[in-house]
Amino acid sequence: MSILFGPARQVGYVVRDIEQAMHEWVRLGVGPWFYKAEVVSTEFRYYGQPSALPQLSIALANTGDLQIELIQQRDTAPTLYLDTLARNGEGAQHLAYWTHDHFDAWCAALIERGYVEGHAGRMGAQRGRFAYFVNAALPSAMIEISESTGGKGEYFEQIRRAAQGWDGTEPIRRVGAG
């Protein structure tokens, strides 16, 4: 638990083959996965500058209260996802903290501590903002602040509830874009 942001809510992994990654996590008993093959970004910045909207596939599942996110980028738009793949290969990329009403303050707290916004934006037309922060002094500590407004918090809660008592049936649940 962070005394600044509360409990970590998500660990995000960048992968090259999201289908294969979901199946491996299912073999470990984690699921069900909520999979969006085409995630729609409505705005995106890379190191503070407006940037091309990346083409992403994202899958989400919970293990207890911790959400696992799998991210596959399907184009070459500049992102921290591609930076991570180039530098480290596949694997855990970020730790996320969720907020309903402290997004700006939490982002400012990271900047005050020497972090730099690596990329940021909004997924979907109404969903809350997200921002990923990096720090050269601790490159392995990429932090995401995610605003859980616009239905995002309710969606995340639906995923958490689906994992409770999951019996292994319907391990991958494909959902529409957005």
Image: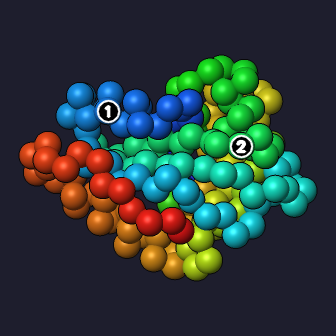
Where residue 41 appears, x then y in whole percent?
66, 64
Q: Earlier in the sequence, mark 1 or mark 2?
A: 1
Q: Of 177 and 12, which appears nearest the observer?
A: 177
75, above or below 122, in the image? above
Q: Secondary structure at mark 2?
A: loop
Amino acid tagged 2? Asp
Question: Quick check: 20 above or below 130?
Answer: above
Question: Residue tagged by mark 2?
Answer: 75
At x 32%, y 65%, the residue is 157
The answer to whether one can see residue 89 in this image is yes
**Residue lying farthest right?**
49
For this view, does 44 lie left or right of residue 171?
right
Within-10-Å neighbours for mark 1: few <14, some 14–19, many 20+ = some
Q: Position of residue 140 (x, y in %)?
A: 64, 27
Q: CA distance from mark 1 to mark 2?
A: 23 Å
**Splitting the image into 4 quarters, where does residue 90 fall?**
top right
| Quadrant that contains the N terminus | top left
Q: Amino acid at mark 1?
A: His
Residue drawn at the location 85% of the way across and 56% of the way down: 51
Q: Quadrant of residue 121?
A: bottom right
Which of the numbered marks, if any, corresponds to residue 23? 1
Left or right for 177, reference 112:
left
